[in-house]
Image: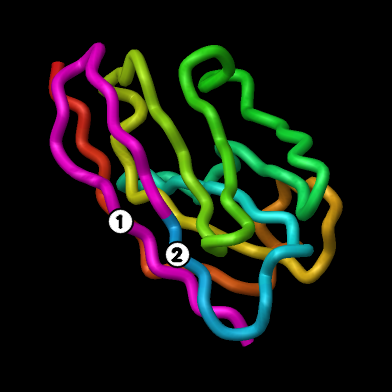
Amino acid sequence: QVQLVESGGGLVQAGGSLRLSCAASGRTARRYAMGWFRQAPGKEREFVATITGNSGITSYTNSVKGRFTISRDNAKQSLYLQMNSLKPEDTAVYYCAARTSPALSSTADTYNYWGQGTQVTVSS
């Protein structure tokens, strides 16, 4: 079992930055691929970014490429999402997720563990 706890959300003006963190505990998640998803009010949960277990290969949804950076520190069992040049359309609850496979995935159903979410609000 893996427990995930997100932090770092908040209110920021458009053009600003936030750094989300996700602390993993329990069964080691070092080999697992991890990802960030988000869900805006009235919308379905959508993929944001993912990173492989050991090699650090990353993938992003098109709308955040060049603005967001996903990274991980396996020694600390932590996942991060650096968000720059934020836009009002980035407003959502952001979720950290882990899957029991080292391979990348942008599909929410392939992730086995989820955090409780952290709210990000970008004002115009």
Give amino acid for label 1: Ser
The residue singled out by tag 2 in the image is 23
Relative to 67, does residue 42 appear above or below in the rendering?
A: below
For the residues bearing labels 1 and 2, Cβ distance under 8 angstroms = yes
Q: What element carries label 2?
A: strand
Q: Is residue 30 left or right of residue 94?
A: right
Q: Which of 77 and 118 is in front in this view?
A: 77
Task: Find numbered disc 1 in the image and state the secondary structure of the residue it sits on.
Answer: strand
Amino acid type of disc 2?
Ala
Q: Residue 60 carries which label?
A: none
Tag shown at residue 7: 1
- Magenta residue check for 18: yes
Which residue sits at x=73%, y=56%? 33
Q: In which quarter of the image is the C terminus?
A: top left
On screen, residue 92 versus residue 38, left or right, reads: left
What percent of the width, then of the height, locates residue 91? 29, 35
Residue lying at 62% horizontally and 19% vertically, measured from the top left: 62
Q: Position of residue 42 (x, y in %)?
A: 35, 47
